[in-house]
Amino acid sequence: MIYPRTFDAYFIAHHQEFFSDVPDLDWKWFKAQGIAESNLSPNAKSGKGAQGIMQIMPKTWRDLANKLNIADVWSPDQNIRAGICYMRQMWGFWDKTPKEFTFHLELAFAGYNAGAGHILAAQKAYLKFRKQGETQTWDRIKSFLPSITHENAIETINYVDRIFQIYKNLVST
């Protein structure tokens, strides 16, 4: 699938602003996220109230708008900037212990979608039942997510999978 390049300059600039210190993290991950969130629609609004290309919830938007000195959730540039800034927060949340890059990215995307606290709760639940010597992975943690977020778990699991699929399509074109 070919995706429009309409907002690429914003994804590139804000990736550089917030992730210049993470050389393995390509800006196209954030474009893939924007496609998964809203199909790059600046006017998208979810039934839960998330807004814009990056589908930012109103409270999160207010916090980010104050931090970044921005005001228009419907502006593609400002919405993408806020979304990537929020992803940096999620990246930092999961940066407390060394992780394999893909696993770190999966946790950050899952936290963006479900809230870091929910993903952390699923991780803690998994750790209680982990077998001796078993490596911690997103696949193992996500199996505990339904006990935390109930019917919303499938949305988060599909969200992470969808971003990875879209990213593969973006880099292959």
Image (cartoon, rainbow, N blue to C red):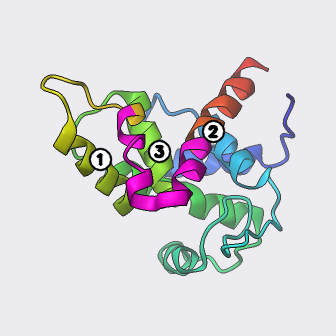
Give the position of the C terminus as an image quadrant: top right
**Residue 75 in the image, given as x and y percentages of width and height:** 76, 69
Q: Which secondary structure, mark 2?
A: helix
In space, the residues marked 2 and 3 are separated at their CA atoms by 18 Å
Q: Work out whether residue 21 can be spotted.
A: no
The magenta segment: 140-159
User: Which residue occupies 66% across, 80% down?
Assistant: 71
User: Which residue occupies 41% across, 40% down?
Assistant: 143
Q: Which secondary structure, mark 1?
A: helix
Asked whether disc 1 touches disc 3, contact meaning CB atoms under 8 Å apart, the reply is no
In space, the residues marked 2 and 1 are separated at their CA atoms by 21 Å
| Mark 2, residue position | 163
The residue lying toward the viewer, choosing from 93 and 121, is: 121
Q: Quadrant of residue 54?
A: bottom right
Q: Quadrant of residue 62?
A: bottom right
**Residue 170 in the image, given as x and y percentages of width and height:** 73, 28
Q: Is residue 131 above or below residue 21?
A: above
